Image (cartoon, rainbow, N blue to C red):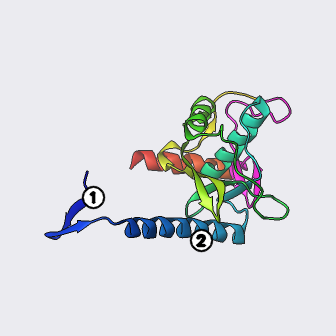
Amino acid sequence: MNGLFFFGGIQLAATYRGLVWETKQGFTRISRLIDDLIAEWETTSVDFKRELHLDTADQKAEFIKDVLSLVNTKASGRRWMVIGFDDRSRTYYGAPDQGITKNRIEQILAMYTNSCVDVQYNLVDYRGESVGMLEVIRDPQKLPYRVARSIGEKKRIEQGDLYVRHGSQVEKPSPLEEQALIEEGNQARSS
């Protein structure tokens, strides 16, 4: 590929300066998004993690619980788990574990969630540091999302469990909330 393309009959060529500009714009947009998320901190659709580890059964159980709560909670906008910030100080803590990949996350979610939760995971640049951005994608046709198989000891989750967020807290839904999720899923599948 030679970097040439046509737009409205005009031949254009990508330049190094243009590519640098686009890259800087991307970094700026991501940094601005993260700054906006930090300003609001944890909500029904945003969860911050200092670190994320997926090695032990309890670590996987806690992760699954957090993801299910993000995907099941009815909230507007995108749903994020941001990895690399300290809960107390709300400042950058450190880069995410390099062993955490989109593939690893998808394998765990495929094994332990029913319906399988769709996600996007990227390491992004935030002011010269690395931050993990996990976007949890809610598909109303798959509602409610539940635990597919039990896992964990101290942080045990059971097959069939359902989780939602109340503000920044992860909890099991009330009977009315669970019924609303079931009805939302049924309505989405029938239309």
Q: Amino acid at mark 1?
A: Gly
**Quick check: can you spot residue 73?**
no
Reading the image, the residue beneath label 1 is: 3
Residue appearing at x 68%, y 52% in the figure = 176
Q: Amino acid at mark 2?
A: Arg
Q: Is residue 35 above or below residue 120?
A: below
Q: Quadrant of residue 163?
A: top right
Labelled disc at residue 48: none
Which of the two residues, 18 or 34, is positioned nearer the viewer here? Answer: 18
The residue that mark 2 highlights is 32
Q: Quadrant of residue 115?
A: top right
The residue lying toward the viewer, choosing from 95 and 134, is 95
Query: What element does badge 1 sit on?
Result: loop
Return the x and y of residue 91 as percentages of the image width and height: 78, 64
In the rendered image, the residue lying farthest to the front is 16
Span of residues in magenta: 152-176
Q: Residue at x 67, y 33 (%)?
A: 160
Q: Main secondary structure of the magenta part?
A: loop
Q: Earlier in the sequence, mark 1 or mark 2?
A: 1
